Image: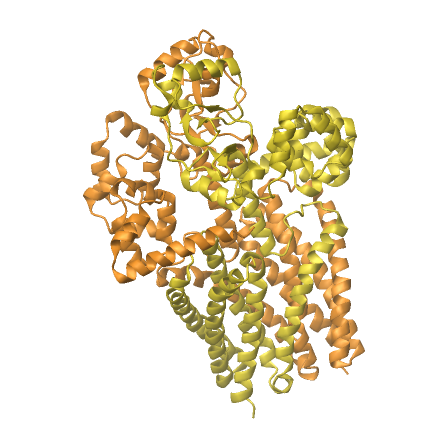
Chain colours: A orange, B yellow
Amino acid sequence: MADTTRHERTAHQLRMLSESLDSGRLGPVRRLVNTLSPAEIGNLLESLPAAKRDVVWGLVDPEDDGEVLLHVDDEVREGLIAAMDADELVAAVEDLDIDDLAELLDDLPDTVIDEVLKSMDRENRDRLEQVLSYPEESAGRLMNPDMVTVRADVTVDVVLRYLRLRGELPESTDHLYVVSRRHQYLGRVALAQLVTNDALTPINRLMDDSQQAIPVETLSDEVARQFSDHDWISAPVVDDNNVLLGRITIDDVVDIIREQADYQVLSAAGVSEDESLFSPVLRAFRGRFLWLSINLATAFLASSVVGRFEATLAEIVALAVLMPIVAGMGGNAGTQVIALMVRGIALGQVSVTHLPALVWKELRIALMNGVLLGLVVAGVTLWWFENTALAVVIFAAMVINLAGAALAGVLVPLGLRRFNIDPAVAGGVILTTVTDVVGFGVFLGLASLFLLS
Amino acid sequence: MADTTRHERTAHQLRMLSESLDSGRLGPVRRLVNTLSPAEIGNLLESLPAAKRDVVWGLVDPEDDGEVLLHVDDEVREGLIAAMDADELVAAVEDLDIDDLAELLDDLPDTVIDEVLKSMDRENRDRLEQVLSYPEESAGRLMNPDMVTVRADVTVDVVLRYLRLRGELPESTDHLYVVSRRHQYLGRVALAQLVTNDALTPINRLMDDSQQAIPVETLSDEVARQFSDHDWISAPVVDDNNVLLGRITIDDVVDIIREQADYQVLSAAGVSEDESLFSPVLRAFRGRFLWLSINLATAFLASSVVGRFEATLAEIVALAVLMPIVAGMGGNAGTQVIALMVRGIALGQVSVTHLPALVWKELRIALMNGVLLGLVVAGVTLWWFENTALAVVIFAAMVINLAGAALAGVLVPLGLRRFNIDPAVAGGVILTTVTDVVGFGVFLGLASLFLLS
């Protein structure tokens, strides 16, 4: 899946850009920057240390400023906004679409918000306020109230004449929405239908009423799932009375999917999704310290288990050498199970009905791995320490810990789900705590029982 | 980011379905299944153990069979195909779009492929062969040759008349492509332009030539990036001579982005992206065993470091109790760094130019974490073992190992990249090997130097 071409090209651009910046020749930098799309400029800004970032930001065509602000993470955005004065900010954001403006608004200084609101006409101000009245991460926040609606009883010809009068359509318009007199959503008509059907065809003959509208309070994750399950490009959003409020387009959905993926990867590693490559040191430190502290507490828990066997360890030092293997392999095996479970839960594929089947499957895999890897470890132990009883003990501990890891791998994410804790975040720490405690405890416990003279 | 509603709803459906299956009442199951979209049916099939999966598959409306096969992972697909006879398969796939058919073809039995090819007309067979001639994971494989092209010198009116004659447009058609007489790509015209402009406007006045066509050999990752950087819904694909070959649509791109995310999460945990919840035990075992074996080898490496200090451990058992903390915290801190780096590399944001700035930033964070967490660990050690020298040694080991983890976290992914190894897969194992070796080595080494009587 590696993408060498792109990596090389971007790395090359970055190097050229950095050299130009270092030498103070801003002309080539400006030219390069303004060949990029707003998303690419955003990506570039995120990749630069703060000082260089500010220089490059000053070179971006003011016309692109608003779009670029939409394409950087919260932290970089704050910095960029801080570097602009009120007039620049107003100019940058006043032409944005309502949904995009709503996304930025929280980050703008109050004076700028006032200016922007004043510069808008009544209708757009009302629309903006409506979008802002919905909770973040909901369909209401994602939707754009700007769309084209038609009535069911007119003909293609009438619609085409109306569209010619209207001029430009909102971005990514692939369907017009058919509404009742009270603006309730009835169905949609594809532009493709308008251009392939006879001018006298009535709209209600072309209308597709099979696509359900999205209720305005739907969570954005669910919106994303519906889009990818149905291959939608846009979808209507309605309130409780089925009144059409706006439309969501696929480009916003692609952003959600990317953010979900980011969140999953970073949060499992204990990094905030807002942290970027060149986050300020203090801020990055704070976020990471919290996570490491939680891990430290669990590490002490595991240590305390080891501490209960000090006498045994004092007598057989080989146990200290081998115990990280037992605990570590349990952690690795459990991580495999938890990764599968987290994906299954995210896709809605895990149900309690199939729990016994899942546990049984994972236990069988764990036994196979436990016996095979246990034999390898026992063999190495025998060769290294020439102690058969020790080899038998470590074999048994491996089998037991891998079985425990499989059980924990299935049950921990389901348990977390129950308490509404995201298993992608907390699953890993809890799992390794279990495998450490079980691994150290079983290995040293069996050793105390069978090996002490 | 958790999505309770959906989880609960799907879990509820799954439970109902399972109960109906267990009681043998297939009527309700059939009704439920046929209210779902092909993607949802695919998701459902992936969530069932093999025996139940086959029963449900038999209840799916044959008309949906082809689309459902496109929406399950390779492993489940194999099973479903094995459960169908040749006639059913031919019927299921013969109406698929060329790009979708190309995706399935490798998994079909030869006799079925022959049947399908025979049932196609010459033009479609040629198109299919063309798509198949491009490497997997390339734009050529993703594209659909089915699209609408127009000439630059005609008017809107002529195009509209042509479209009415033609009838239905290919799915997700938002633009028509303008080509030269030799079928070279010149630009695109939005359907939105056709319906908002005067009938006598010439196409070349409406044509947008700013969107670059995608070269046919572009890797699919790069295609996905371009789509999300430019908010495209579809894009033209051309050969080396700029001849238009087909178009890629956003729904395929959304699938790529989802697969990338899956791959990243699963491969970091050592699970094959093809493994699903109910993969056959033997197959799952094989994939996971390989990964665990690699981890076992690195675990022995760490153990051998511990083994060099047997004499020290025999004298001071507390070292055995505390050493997992030093090694483990290094692993946790390094994992945070590597997660950020892997994302940065994937986004093309990491360049060697900024390496010193990155290393310096990470070292500072590591020092802050190392000193703070080190003080906590030293305090606990002092309280637990009442040994000041031991507390000082573990403090120093913590600081050094966290600094080492930061260095490894930055350098390991970049080094892997150099050798074209995906850092998302191999980064974690190498990093924890480093932090284990450094953690055990430094802690036990310092202890040997300063604590032995």
Q: Residue at x 62, y 87 (%)?
A: B315
Measured as percent of width and height from the top left, residue B35 is found at: 63, 25
Q: Is residue B451 left or right of residue A173?
A: right
Q: Quadrant of residue B365?
A: bottom left
Q: How many marks?
A: 0
Q: Residue at x 68, y 82 (%)?
A: A317
Q: Residue furthest bottom?
A: B453
In this picture, is B254 found above or below A183? below
Q: Quadrant of the C terminus of chain B?
A: bottom right
In this picture, is A158 found above or below A111? above
In this picture, is A441 found above or below B272? below
Measured as percent of width and height from the top left, residue A348 is found at: 60, 40
In this picture, is B291 found above or below B277? below
Q: Quadrant of residue A181?
A: top left
From the viewer's side, name the closer residue of B363 and A442.
Answer: B363
From the viewer's side, name the closer residue of B51 and A138.
Answer: B51
Q: Is residue A48 left or right of residue A197?
A: left
Measured as percent of width and height from the top left, residue A139 is found at: 44, 33
Measured as percent of width and height from the top left, residue B173 is found at: 49, 26
Determine if residue A182 is in view: no
Q: Residue at x 77, y 31 (%)?
A: B84
From the viewer's side, name the closer residue of B62 and A22.
Answer: A22
Q: Residue furthest top?
A: A200
Determine if residue B281 is in view: yes
